[in-house]
Amino acid sequence: MPRGERRQPQRAISATSLTDNGNMIREREIAGQESQPAEAVIAAQPAPGLHSKGPASVLKHAIVYGLGIAARPMVSFLMLPLYTHFIRSGDYGVYELMNRGGEFLGIFIFLAIPRAMMRIYALRDDRAYKHQVVTSALLFSGCWGLLLTGAFVAASGPLSQLLTKQPGYGHLFAIIMLSAWLDAGIQTPLSHMRAKEQSGWYTAINIARLAAAVSLNVYFVAVLHLGVAGIIYSSAIVTGGTWLLLVTKTLRETGLSVSRQAIVLMLRFGLPLSIGGLPVFVLHFADRFILAHYYSAADVGTYAVGYRLGMLVGMLVNDPFGLAYEPYSYAIERRPDAKQIYSRILTYHAVAGLLVFVGLSAFSRDIVRLMTAPDYFGAQWVVPWVALGYVFYGMSNTARLGLMLSQRTELTLPLNAAAAGCNIALNFALLPRFGIIGAAMATTFSFLALAIINYAVTYRVYPIPCEPVRLAKAVGAAIAIAAVIMLFPPRVLALRLIAATACAAAYPALLLVLGFFHKDETRAISRILARGLSALRSKAGEVIGA
């Protein structure tokens, strides 16, 4: 690159350029064409106004997203009695294996195009260009996904037998793959809503999907007694209807203008993430297949129920946080205090997840016994381990933000592969000896390893400071409280519930005793509590006066 061009001010960087350790890579160079003169390119700027928003913006949208995502674990709670009383643990284990196998193949359908679309979308404040990016992502992912799904459906019989070691499930696996393709088509319109910060619409659509899925599940499973087939049918119907609605709505807004260069940019960004997603799948779900090798499908079903409950940390904290944080983090990356904000948010994210982990650990025994049939009671020991693992997994995603900001997504593959190798080794070491608890322990330790290596490598690429002392206090306090209530539970139900509630409430107090909070945070918490108490007194006065 000529010396003069390298010295052009930042406002002259191409709107679709990518930065890789400070080196500019232009869109036309990626497409194999000659680059334009510096005077001809347009400045790359985030959407107007976004960069001026503080962490409160993330919190606001995370809460809105959380209202929709929180419905998912609530639905899981409501549906668990239905599933566990109408579906045997062995059949549920078969469904789990097929569903996870479909998710693995779905990685090749998605190609991380929705995430890539969000990043390319944010590079230029040009409405026509943004519409081109969305339409290009939608049409490319649809055509590519349809081609690949057709191949998977044609081989659905052998694939289902390979996954479950049982014949006769080919037609159900074909429906799972068709649902995966439709879901891939849904994610681009949903990502478009996230990019425009339409958290309300995003949440409303997800709640509507959940309501429809619950209704169909109840009808197919409890009324028609279709078993796991009923779950698969209801998912396909809801996903198909949502796909038709969102794709039609999006194309009406954006038109049909397609950019080949935008597709190239999205593939460049998304392919490393997609390939890196393969070891992520191993991290999350390889334990099911290793468990099926040593034990029965019934054990897989019991483990899957415990894992689903432990994943509440992801559903209540990691998912809504990630939906709000990703577009926000891109918008503020040019602020001088951006790295300090990233560092503080990493700590807050960890504490939020640990708070949910403490609560799940305290109530796991009674939740499992209340929500499931006796065949699934062994799941209570899986919940705390998986919940803690998902705290570490959320921290790992936040820690690798620097890879997204510096466009070094190709590093995700070796990082995820290292953690996946750790997961497989731990499963083979712990699972034969400890059963489903060993699989849960492997999840926790491998997610911790992922968080550590993600931060260590990302720091060398895009150094964002962390707060190790505060994180150690937060994690240590949470594990200590969870261990006490898990190892020494009162035998009487009423006393057990009181003790569990007290332990869960003790976590913030213990953090305060340990000196976890900074002075500004203590002042902010005091103000919030004071306002809350004032509002309660005011409300009580109104009630008494009435």
Image (cartoon, helix red, strand yellow):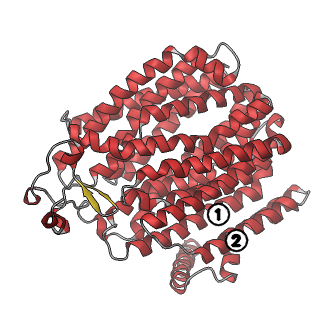
Say which quadrant the C terminus sits in.
bottom right
Residue occupying image coordinates x 53% and y 81%: 521
Q: Answer with the quarter of the image where residue 95 lies.
A: top right
**Is residue 328 visible to us here?**
no
Residue occupying image coordinates x 43% and y 26%: 240
User: Closest to the observer: 148 or 33?
Assistant: 33
Q: Amino acid at mark 1?
A: Leu
Tag 2 and tag 1, C-beta contact below 8 Å: yes
User: Crowdedness of circle 1 by 10 Å Cα count: few (<14), some, many (20+)?
Assistant: many
Is 477 displayed left or right of 57 in the figure?
A: right
Residue occupying image coordinates x 57% and y 41%: 281
Q: Answer with the quarter of the image where residue 157 lies.
A: top right
Q: Which mark is residue 507?
A: 2
Residue 419 location (% of width, % of height): 61, 50
> Is residue 12 depicted above or below 200 in this figure?
below
Residue 528 location (% of width, % of height): 52, 77
Is 232 displayed left or right of 293 in the figure?
A: left
Q: Amino acid at mark 2?
A: Tyr
